[in-house]
Amino acid sequence: MSDLHTKYMGLTLRSPLVASAGPIQQKVDGVRALADAGVGAIVMYSLFEEQVRHEEARQAEIELEYMDSFAESLSFFPTVASNEGGITERYLAHLEASANAVDIPVIASLNGATNGGWVDTAKRMEDAGAAGIECNIYMVPGDLEQSAEEVEDRHVEIVQAVKDAVSVPVAVKLSPFFSALGNMATRLDAAGADALVMFNRFLQPDINVETMQVEPGVWLSSPADARLPLTWIAALSGRIGASLAASSGVESANDVVKYLLAGADVVMTTSALVRHGAGYATELQKGLESYLQRKEVDLDTLRGTLAVPNDASTAEYERNGYVAALEKAKTTYGS
């Protein structure tokens, strides 16, 4: 058996395969099934900023209502009605139960786009037993007046605020749609991000031409979706201090190996586990072990073998690859 132990954002994992946020984690039995299948860590499904804000607004309305009550009626309400039983409380209770149910790190996920709501909730997640916090910054800058600098600054501010609030490591799940992604990665690294998860997939809608309506779309990833994160992980590997987590496009053990060759510290998957069940994680890890044994190489030696060399210009390296790909296309598809 190959040694698959891995360091990820300061945590020691038994395997580089991580179950990323997904529906299997909605039940404690699903969390146990993933752990039994051998994954190194589990990222919980996301708690959304909008859900937290809605509940905070509801709480404020209740408090305001009771402030205007007659004094003689206050005895009927000795304490302000709480949000117990709400989405946030249920998430935290489930997070605590999940963390207690398995012996591997359970990482909480908070999904949002503004500066508010992150700090208090992240702290409560830590108190509930989260081994780390994944900030899923799902931001679509639709405001035509908003500059790229403002978008980037907001990401940095969120990371700094959460890092100041918790003692557990903090990961950032990124969009690939930055004009200078490499610079954004180095800024987040400098701001204290312990890991970068690459990448968040935007769930773009489709249009039904018959009903003439916009239809929201959710689809599972395919191996083709790995091309972009592979490129950036290879470019960033060894150049920043934060751990690199690959996300999207994992269907087989070969996909796991590709990400490790590019320099990923861990490889995350949801789609493959949804398609085949939690137990499929065992098959992915067996495939990785088989590859390592066949190539007679250990995991640490394998990792980053095909990353962009540290003494090479990343820009020139990628440009040369682009030109080479076009030349190959001419040969393959030309007449």
Image: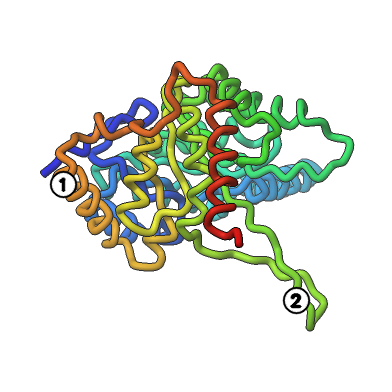
Spot the residue most to the left.
Answer: 1
The percent position of residue 256, horizontal first and vertical second, equals 34, 48
In this figure, which residue is indicated by the disc labeled 1?
294
Up-down relation of residue 144 to residue 101 (above or below): above
Question: Neighbour class for label 1 at 10 Å: few (<14), some, many (≥20)?
Answer: few
The quarter of the picture where residue 142 lies is top right
* Residue 276 in view in this figure: yes
Image side of residue 8 versus residue 73, left or right: left
The image quadrant where one finds the N terminus is top left
The percent position of residue 147, horizontal first and vertical second, equals 82, 31
Q: Amino acid at mark 2?
A: Asn
Q: Secondary structure at mark 2?
A: strand
The image quadrant where one finds the C terminus is bottom right
N-terminal label among 2 and 1: 2
Up-down relation of residue 308 to residue 272 (above or below): above
So how many labels did they put on this image? Answer: 2
